Image: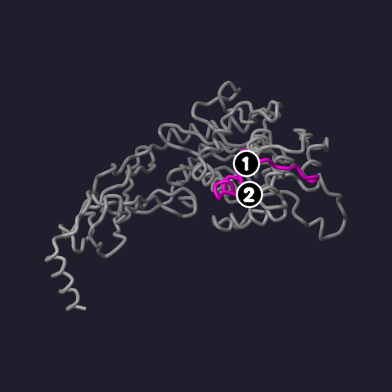
Amino acid sequence: VIGLTMYKVAADDEFSIAAKGAIAVDVTSGKILYEKDSQSPIEVGSISNLLTTYLVYEAIDKGQFNMDSFVDISDNAYYLTNNIDFTNLSMEARRYKVRDLLQASLLASSHGATVALAEKVAGSEDKFVQMMNAKLQEWGIADATLVNSSGLNTKLVEEETTTKTDTEKATENKFSAYDVAVIARHLITDFPKVTDITSKVKGDFSGIELDNYNYMLKDQPNFRLGVDGLKAGSSETDGISFVASTTQDGMRLITVVLGVDEIDGDPYAPFVATASLMNYIAQHYTQTTILKAGDAYEDSKVNITDGKKATIPAVAEKDFKVIQRIGSQADYKISFTSLKKTYLAPISKKTKVGTLTYEDPELVGQGYLENKQPSISMVPSKKVEKSIFLKVWWNQFVRFVNE
């Protein structure tokens, strides 16, 4: 085990994103690679749809409905498509498939489509917001503010009053960059097929062509190889925000820039800021394999009872990859822990018998999303057969006497 010296790593003084909040994380490990005011919640507009999308996919996974299930458009959702102040997609048919509504929500930020999906999952938008809050609580997010499923400012759909209670009431969803990163990571980890939608430059909604507001996709003004999602959004108060997912130099990344400063009204500002953040990551971090699949780490082994062997090496179930700073000399620690004191034979090669954990000495901000440092499951190097009858009988007799 290598000696461990823990210390914090700050972002370079010379590098700063022109945004109110920002964060970059490695999807596989959850390691934070850059952050700026990442714990400060601001209004994020339709970035909220990422959480709604997660709950839709979760409902599909539970068998509540499928992508080809039809959704009846309620008067509540239909109203949002007919108000000239915030409509961007008509839903005159009043009945659409789940897959069409997901495209409308993720690509075109359709408020009506998002509300219709929320109602499909929970029966009403109010109940759906309760589900959203419960999911955030499950993920350890406590600083977010949720008023609806779509991120639409409620002042646009409700008559304003002058009472103190109403004027102090929240009117728009608020998330921190950290919150958004947690949501995005869960979405693309648990339901990776979401990028089949978010990577589309154009979509189709019952014959209506949808434009994706992600200008970093192929053939777009800010194209960058590897980008396949996720969502742009805006707020009158806090400006434009963008969440990107990409693969670069073998790393699967999520970047979040919230409340981007639009220089001279430049509509591409959030994508320029995102590209500079991705460049920063490429210049400062690299992915390292610290243990290959099938290899043991030092003396990682487990005890076997009634087997043809008394111990068996524990090996990596898959390649163990971590993200490290380029040129770093910091010490790190790797530790192996057996899940049980001993294992009773026979044992298959797929049995999870231990955990190998990487303790990172270079932490940015909180270090890792949800405070979970990288680890990997360890399995037996080979199948362990049960020993001959007489040896098993003798072992059981000895244990009986000892006990």
Residue at 55% in and 50% down:
62
Is residue 356 in view?
Answer: yes
Report x, y in % for residue 331. Answer: 31, 49
Figure quadrant of residue 80: top right
Which residue is at the front of the view, 353 or 215? 353
Which residue is at the front of the view, 93 or 133? 93
**Residue 253 in the image: above or below residue 296:** above
| Amino acid type, mark 2 | Phe
Residue at image mark 2: 175
- Residue 69 in magenta? yes
Crowdedness of circle 1 by 10 Å Cα count: few (<14), some, many (20+)? Answer: many
Which residue is at the front of the view, 24 or 20? 24
Q: Rounded to the nearest whole Å, what is the CA distance between mark 2 and mark 1? A: 9 Å
Residue at image mark 1: 258
In the structure shown, which secondary structural element does the residue marked by tag 1 occupy?
strand
Question: Does residue 348 appear left or right of residue 158 in this picture?
Answer: left
In the structure shown, which secondary structural element does the residue marked by tag 2 occupy?
strand
| Amino acid type, mark 1 | Leu
Question: Does residue 335 appear left or right of residue 398 in this picture?
Answer: right
Question: Does residue 383 appear left or right of residue 23 in this picture?
Answer: left
Where are the magenta residues, as a range? 56-76
**Residue 248 in the image: above or below residue 38:** above
Give the mark count: 2
Report x, y in % for residue 378. Answer: 30, 51
Whichever of labels 2 and 1 marks the residue nearer the N terminus, that label is 2
